[in-house]
Amino acid sequence: MAPFRLRAPRFRRFGSRLLLLIVGLVALAQGANYIFVVRENHKSAIERIHQNLEQGALLFKRRYEARLDDLWNRAVLMSRDYAIRQLFLEEKPDPATVHSALLTYSSRMNVPFMVLLSANGSKIGDTGGVLADSALKPFQELVKSASVADEAREQAFAHLPNDGPGGKLYALIVVPIYAPAPEIVAWIGLALPIDHDFAMELKADTRLDATFFYGTAGAMSPVESTLTDAEASSAAPSTPEESDRTVNAGGKSYVTVYRPLPLITPGYASIALQRSLAAELAPDRLLERFLRYLSLVLLAVAALLAVRIARNLSEPLRLLAAHTEVVARGDYSIRLKLNREDEIGQLATSFNRMSEGLAERDQVRDLLDKNLSPEIAAQLMSGGGALVGEELEVTVLFVDLRNFTRLSESMPPREVLALLNRYFDRMSGIVEIYLGVVDKYMGDAIMALFGAPVTHPNHADSAILAALEMKSGLARLNAELATEGRAKLAFGIGINTSRIIAGNIGSSRRLNYSVLGDGVNVAARLQDLTRMSQYRADILVSAATLKAARGKYLVRPLGAAPVRGRDEPVEIFAVEGME
């Protein structure tokens, strides 16, 4: 067989698709990896920010407590100072002297406001100039609390009005003056402002932005902040409760924790510690930028590799596809030749073996179709030739030429065979038209089955109609033979319907699909009875066939006839046509 070598077109559609597939997969993988890294960086940044925010909140608490502790210790020293004690030797201290002393001490202690209160909380004097007179009430509240506490020290946050408009947050502390302990003769009140400097110091220590808010529930405003006024206002909490969330302030995302501050004055206060998400992610952006560049490089490399792989696969696959078309057309003689030792080469070898197998299969099928009916051949092919049988109700038809032996003696063997094949071709075609199957040729006789191996409900009618058509077909054939100067042919047909055993019969080496049973013998004997002159019939059917038939036919009852091989006679009818 000639080798098959098809010139494949240049790498086009398949290569383009393979290129897109490989590049797409690499792009998908890199994109998924990039998205994963970005998401993990974002998640990790938020976790780090939350940790920093918690530490910042703790540091804020420690910082202001440390400041208050320092003020406490210095105020205790002040309360023991001789100059302060001298003020209380007089029944009514001089206001000017008290004011001057408090200014001196406030300057030393670096606090903007200091007040001196009596034991019952009434004002003795203050530094003035910062807080309004109404700011004394929180100090007096602390004095009352300290008077009943085990420890005289009291501290709290307060929003105190200034001499001007507005107000600020302060951390307040009151320190007793003993004369001597445990008798308290006066109180020193100190106000530590929570101002911008305090917020900036906190930011320097924690790298966090800090904003202090004051107001009512749902309407809190920034008091001091390391952010701009617009950014601080955007981050205002809706409630004073403790919470964690991400806010958008001035177009920037801030992870924020809100911690309430206990106020001794009316209203609510809280501190917001914030960290810019963009600032936290800045180091991670370098990695993400590197991954973007790396992805572009990998895509370029993948594209180059994909072009090479596609070109290596495209041509042999096109050859295989073209060879498939050749095989689909039924040409199994051509062989595909690919000088490759990889999987594609193995596939080409398998294609060639498949072509050989298909050629052998077609040879077997052709032989089966020529020696068996297509239905029986299909039965053998599907069943693998297994020796199986099944009980079916079928109609068996026997047709046999009369006096053909005498006719053949006067003709050369070749002409006899040609005439017989000509007759069989007409009769077999009619059998197949009426869904029958030629079971076998026996000399000049035909055995046909209706309802096996392919079952159908009208097998009795099909057999009778086929017999009538065979009679007409024989008449047409005789007309042709007459024009050729040949003798006419005559036949007899016997038909019987019964339940028989149908299946492959034979040995493991050779099989023949056929049917067994008394009903088959009855059909053959009915065909023999057509030779008897008293019946004057070319087609004889049994009562069982007429009972199974659904059509209306012109029949002539012939009574019960003895059948060779059976004890009981069979009621028979001559079929002469259709009603």
Image (cartoon, rainbow, N blue to C red):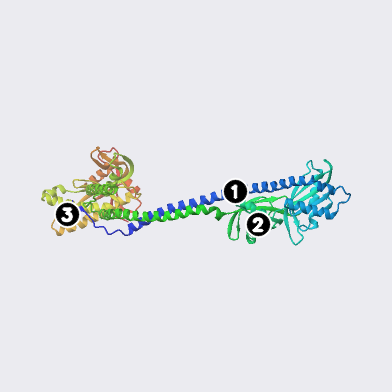
Amino acid bearing label 2? Ser
Q: How many other residues sit within 10 Å of disc 3, few (<14), some (14-19) or many (≥20)?
A: some
Towards the viewer: 457 or 481: 457
Can you say which quadrant of the picture contains the C terminus?
Answer: bottom left
Image coords of residue 176 (percent x, y): 80, 45
Q: What residue type is labelled 3?
A: Lys
10 Å crowding of disc 1: few (<14), some (14-19), many (20+) = some
Nearest to N terminus: mark 1 or mark 2: 1
Q: Is residue 579 left or right of residue 43?
A: left
Residue 49 or 24: which is nearer the viewer? Answer: 49
Residue mark closest to the camera, 2 vs 3: 2
Q: Mark 1 points at which residue?
A: 52
Q: Name the side, left or right, on which 531 lies relative to 289.
A: left
Badge 1 amino acid: Asn
The crowding category of the residue bearing disc 2, from other C-alpha atoms within 10 Å (few below 14, some 14 to 19, many at least 20), is: many
Instruction: Report which residue position mark 3 lands on.
Output: 488
* Upstream in sequence: badge 3 or badge 1: 1
Residue in front for this viewpoint, 331 or 245: 245
Q: Is residue 98 left or right of residue 447?
A: right
Measuring from the top left, give residue 560's x and y in whole percent: 29, 44
> Circle 2 is placed at which residue position?
225
Q: How far apart are marks 2 and 3 (CA)?
A: 125 Å
Residue closest to the eye, 161 or 262: 161
Whether residue 447 is visible: no
Image quadrant assignment for residue 178: top right
Label 3 sits on a secondary structure element that is loop
2 or 3: tag closer to the N-terminus: 2
Q: Where is residue 441 in the image (x, y as percent from the top left)?
A: 21, 46
